[in-house]
Image (tube, rainbow, N blue to C red):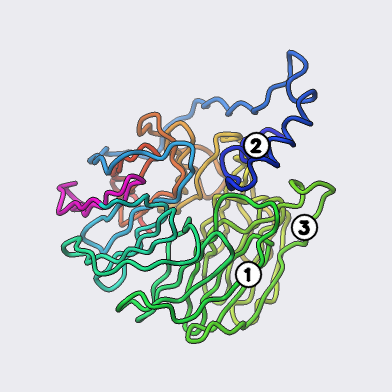
């Protein structure tokens, strides 16, 4: 129960605070009685290993004030030359990805909670007040600000002249890149109890796909928002409202003709991208996310277990509890390894073949919520403390 209780405190939306407090009070006896019982499960101790990957520590840049305890998906973006990053206290920076030199920095009276997303010379960020900010990536100059219906906790998707944004009230909206005008909005019911987080929309040729808090993956027409298909991964189960939580907050991953999705206390699945039909489904509980290569789907479970599944059948290939209760980020593939961050600021490299630890490095003590960004042989990581790091992996093949 450790991670569920901790997750409820740190990731459930504020509107659920009273209900959660009542739950904790009712459960008080079982949670706090006895010398051997603890509210939180302790993170797994770091194990000894023989390093098999060389690392070169690159540069570090302070973006702004951190967001410890909020578990925000503030992940840097790139145009291939510069890295763009934002902080919770309203800073946005452009940084030369090789040298770490600041290109420009702008500050806004906003609390950024998602982004940035880069596309065709613009940067788009979301705030806790439901604002979308569009910036010129060359200068940081504001192009426009537009409002959506509620808080934005996931990066937007951009295709052609449209921006697609998911808000915490269940709405998915399309806005014009030119002026922020709303093209269409689709409303999705939000369960009474859900995790604090949302799945980011992803776009394909004719559709925008998104996961929702009721455990469904939905595809909408890009132009008018009409429903194309909708698939439930697993129906909510359990006797209590908490046991029924089955949010899809992990980012969807498109690979080939499939979309890969994972739900909390539910399943990980491969769906046919054109129809939403389930190709395979395996029991799992995801919150952070996954990454996919030609053969394997790598996923971080909510309890910290790292699992590998066959991309073709969903059969489990291996699982490792090395990072149990260390709340690893979604994995990112680099060469023959996957890399994840954890709650104590460590980056861990695990073998794609068997999940064994290949390397580890500390980026300070701040939690790493967002998945590492891999560009060539370099890794860029933004910590919850507001710092951006680069780490180079010499002589390692990249994605």
Q: Position of residue 147 (x, y in %)?
A: 41, 66
Q: Residue at x 29, y 64 (%)?
A: 123
Circle 1 residue: 188
The answer to which of marks 3 and 2 sits earlier in the sequence is 2
In this view of the protein, which residue sits in the foreground, 101 or 152?
152
The label number, if any, that marks residue 3 in the structure image:
2
Q: Indicate whether 36 appears above or below 108.
A: above
Disc 3 secondary structure class: loop
- Which region is colored magenta? 86-107
Q: Earlier in the sequence, mark 1 or mark 3?
A: 1
Can you tell which quarter of the image residue 273 is in? bottom right
Membership of 306 in magenta stretch = no
Mark 3 = which residue? Answer: 236
Q: CA distance from mark 1 to mark 2?
A: 27 Å
Q: Is residue 38 left or right of residue 372?
A: right
Label 3 – label 2 distance at C-alpha: 19 Å
- Furthest residue to the top? 35
């Amino acid at each position: 129960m450790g991670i569920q209780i901790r997750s409820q405190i740190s990731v459930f939306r504020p509107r659920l605070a009273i209900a959660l407090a009542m739950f904790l009070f009712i459960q008080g006896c079982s949670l706090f009685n006895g010398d051997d019982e603890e509210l939180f499960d302790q993170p797994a101790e770091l194990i000894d290993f023989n390093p098999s990957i060389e690392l070169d520590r690159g540069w570090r840049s302070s973006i702004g004030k951190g967001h410890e305890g909020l578990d925000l998906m503030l992940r840097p973006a790139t145009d291939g030359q510069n890295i763009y990053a934002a902080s919770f206290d309203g800073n946005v920076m452009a940084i030369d990805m090789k040298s770490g030199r600041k290109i420009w920095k702008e500050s806004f009276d906003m609390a950024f909670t998602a982004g940035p997303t880069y596309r065709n010379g613009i940067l788009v960020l979301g705030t806790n007040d439901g604002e979308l900010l569009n910036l010129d990536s060359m200068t940081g100059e504001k192009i426009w600000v537009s409002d959506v219906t509620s808080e934005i906790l996931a990066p937007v998707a951009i295709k052609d002249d449209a921006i697609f944004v998911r808000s915490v009230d269940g709405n998915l909206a399309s806005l014009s890149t030119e002026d922020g005008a709303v093209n269409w909005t689709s409303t999705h019911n939000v369960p009474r109890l859900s995790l604090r987080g949302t799945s980011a929309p992803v776009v394909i040729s004719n559709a925008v796909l998104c996961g929702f808090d009721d455990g469904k993956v939905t595809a909408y027409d890009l132009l008018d928002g009409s429903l194309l298909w909708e698939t439930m991964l697993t129906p909510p189960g359990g006797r209590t409202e908490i046991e029924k939580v089955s949010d899809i907050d992990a980012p969807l991953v498109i690979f080939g003709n499939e979309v890969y999705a994972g739900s909390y206390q539910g399943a990980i699945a491969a769906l046919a991208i054109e129809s939403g039909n389930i190709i395979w489904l395996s029991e799992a509980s995801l919150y952070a996310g996954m990454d996919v290569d030609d053969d394997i789907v790598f996923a971080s479970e909510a309890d910290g277990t790292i699992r590998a599944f066959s991309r073709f059948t969903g059969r489990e290939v291996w699982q490792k509890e090395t990072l149990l209760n260390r709340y690893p980020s979604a994995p990112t593939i680099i060469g023959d390894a996957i890399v994840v961050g954890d709650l104590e600021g460590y980056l861990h490299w695990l073998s794609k073949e068997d999940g064994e630890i290949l390397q580890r490095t500390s980026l300070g003590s701040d939690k790493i919520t967002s998945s590492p960004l891999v560009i060539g042989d370099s890794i860029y990581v933004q910590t919850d403390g507001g710092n951006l790091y680069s780490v180079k992996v010499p002589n390692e093949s990249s994605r």
